[in-house]
Amino acid sequence: MEKKGVLVIGSVNMDMVVKADHFPLPGETILGESFQMFPGGKGANQAVASAKLGSDTFFVGRFGSDVFKDKIFESMQADGVDLSGIFIDYANPTGIAMITVDHHGENQIVVISGSNMKLSLEDIEARIPLFRRVKVVLAQLEIPIGTVLRSAHLAKENGAMFILNPAPALTDKLPDELLKLTTYITPNEVELERLTSITIHSIEDIKKAGAKLLSYGVKNVIVTMGSKGAFYISDDKTLKVKAKPVDVIDTTGAGDAFNGALASALSENYKIEEAIEFANLAAAISVTRMGAQSSMPGFNEILELQRPHGT
Ligand code: RIB
């Protein structure tokens, strides 16, 4: 069977989002502008991004047995994600994220992991048939690190590429074993700084930090830089890909749009330059709308943004 599609191993959350003019200072109470709930979680967001772009996309994660599970399940299914590999946890609730979005569209997020941190090695073992099917496996760090490592091993054993989005930046050092199994790592500047202990002020710093990650055994580094675009570093190539300027409403899930779109593009055999450009466009569209999964674009929207004006 020809390998095809994307398998995302990761978290799923219900996002509780308030919009406010500014972030409250410690001890300050402010009056916000709106409150909404959106399906979120880095893993689930990335799966939705990939599925909405037309790739066969499977999600393995742990939901609680509660009303949030029902809402998110319905929404992800409608977005085209194959959820046959998920687990329901009867002892722990679905993860939630408390998110504040300010008038610049920037966010602050506190995650309560719930069932996400119970996604176990046994869960992953039980989904080996999915690893056999797909071309790309994608994981983040909102689930136990041992589960991420086992997923990376299974990707390799089954001939799939492994993309690690090292978000959130919870640790200064990832296991060497994990980095050696990683085909693409996709930190933002904060995560890059954390993982390499190199302070990032310039492109030269990014190149130095990227080279450090390569020296740990990662094959390719893609640094996401928001409105400044993305930077690619491998042993034989460095490349800067510009971002499209857009009006920002909410940056929540922009990194997830990038990673889901990157996985989708690589599963469709795009060249790396094209895959990064495609992922940048997906992220650009996502920040023009509220919410995480709700802001992920379809394929035609990317073509539309790519097209020079008036053509
Ligand atoms: O990357 C954005 C996501 O981070 C949100 O959807 C939230 O759930 C947290 O996981």
Image (cartoon, helix red, strand yellow):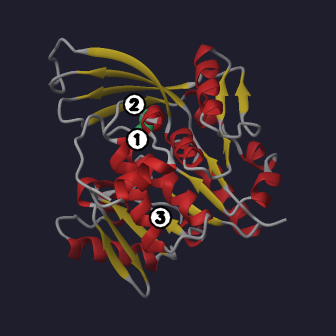
Disc 3 to disc 2, how far (Cα)? 25 Å
Q: Secondary structure at mark 2?
A: loop
Q: Residue at x 52, y 31 (%)?
A: 113
Q: Residue at x 22, y 15 (%)?
A: 32
Which part of the image, by quadrant, shows the N terminus?
A: bottom right
Residue on which disc 1 sits? 253
Disc 2 to disc 1, how far (Cα)? 7 Å
Q: Residue at x 46, y 41 (%)?
A: 296
Name the one closer to the observer, 200 or 71. Answer: 71
Q: Amino acid at mark 1?
A: Gly
Tag on residue 185? 3
Say whether residue 277 is visible.
yes
**Could you say where residue 116 lies in the image, as x and y percent from the top left?**
59, 34
Ligand 1: give its quadrant. top left
Q: Residue at x 75, y 64 (%)?
A: 3
Name the one closer to the observer, 136 or 185. Answer: 136
